Image: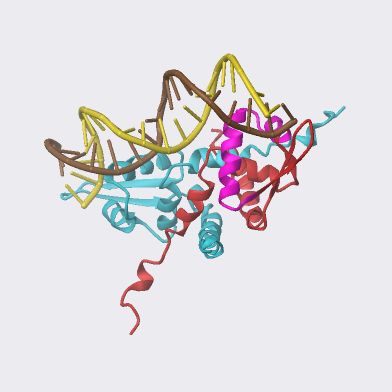
Chain colours: A red, B cyan, C brown, D yellow
Amino acid sequence: MPPRIATTAPDECMVEAATEVLGGKWKLVILRHLQNGTRRFGELHRAIPGVTARMLTRQLRELEADGLVERKVYAEVPPKVEYSVSPIGASLKEITDRLEAWGHWYREQVRD
Amino acid sequence: MPPRIATTAPDECMVEAATEVLGGKWKLVILRHLQNGTRRFGELHRAIPGVTARMLTRQLRELEADGLVERKVYAEVPPKVEYSVSPIGASLKEITDRLEAWGHWYREQVRD
DNA sequence: CAGTATCCATGCCGATACTG
DNA sequence: CAGTATCGGCATGGATACTG
């Protein structure tokens, strides 16, 4: 027999799965930039004002560990590292686009 | 004359506007519950395992201050307080639904 | 260029006890 | 029932200096 009240408490906690992976301060911003194409470390650094190299590195490594971002190192001097969205990261494009649009709209609403 | 390279650095930082407001550990989870209808404090507390009363209060107050949630106090004993999404909060339903679905899908992908 | 290493401040958040 | 008060740990994240 099926569980009695299973449907009254669905696994809405799956948003938690999302926030665990996207929760970092710069992660959605990074993803948003990478949705537009592969970027080098320095490009990202310049494109995101306010982030430090330390934080950019950390967040990128976490995104990589979570399978959202791919990191490609070229054996050159000077060093060259390219970041891009993985297939999983690319699947977030609709959501980041909507968040972007919503953020824009929200700002309009709250400017009294 | 138009700015030279304006379009190369569009205001993609608008996702930051969204994360500032949605960034709390429980905010999206709370919103997700309130999208399904008005809830009392205790109902939310029981519906979200792991959250403490302190954190639930704080996150609800921040959501209220940011205009996403409305709080209605009934002058009764015992006290009764109802929370619901504001029109602005309701505008996030599509996004929270998608995040929920994505979180579910993501979990499937990463279970090795 | 693409990072690390080190130090350090903030504050997020939990646990516990208490209240109108 | 719906909170608040207080304490405190620990992760998050910034500044600065340094490196292969």
Magenta range: A42-69
Q: Is residue A15 above or below residue D19?
A: below
The spot of residue B66 in percent (x, y) is 46, 39
Viewer-proximal residue, A4 or D18?
D18
Viewer-proximal residue, A72 or A87?
A72
Could you tell me which quadrant the N terminus of chain B lies in?
top right
The spot of residue A77 in percent (x, y) is 79, 32
Viewer-proximal residue, A22 or D9?
D9
- Quarter location, residue A43: top right
Report whether A45 appears left or right of B35. Answer: right
Residue at x 70% of width, y 35% of height: A41
Residue at x 56% of width, y 63% of height: B109
Residue at x 44% of width, y 57% of height: B35
The spot of residue A96 in percent (x, y) is 62, 49
Q: Is residue B15 visible?
A: no
Report whether A39 appears left or right of B63. Answer: right
| Tally of numbered tags | 0
Report whether B42 appears left or right of B102. Answer: left
Q: Is residue B89 visible?
A: yes
Residue at x 48% of width, y 55% of height: A17
Q: Is residue A65 magenta?
A: yes
Q: Is residue C11 above or below residue A11?
A: above
Q: Is residue D12 above or below residue B90?
A: above
Prevailing secondary structure of the magenta residues: helix
Q: Residue furthest bottom?
A: A1
The spot of residue A14 in percent (x, y) is 46, 59
Report whether B11 appears left or right of A25. Answer: right
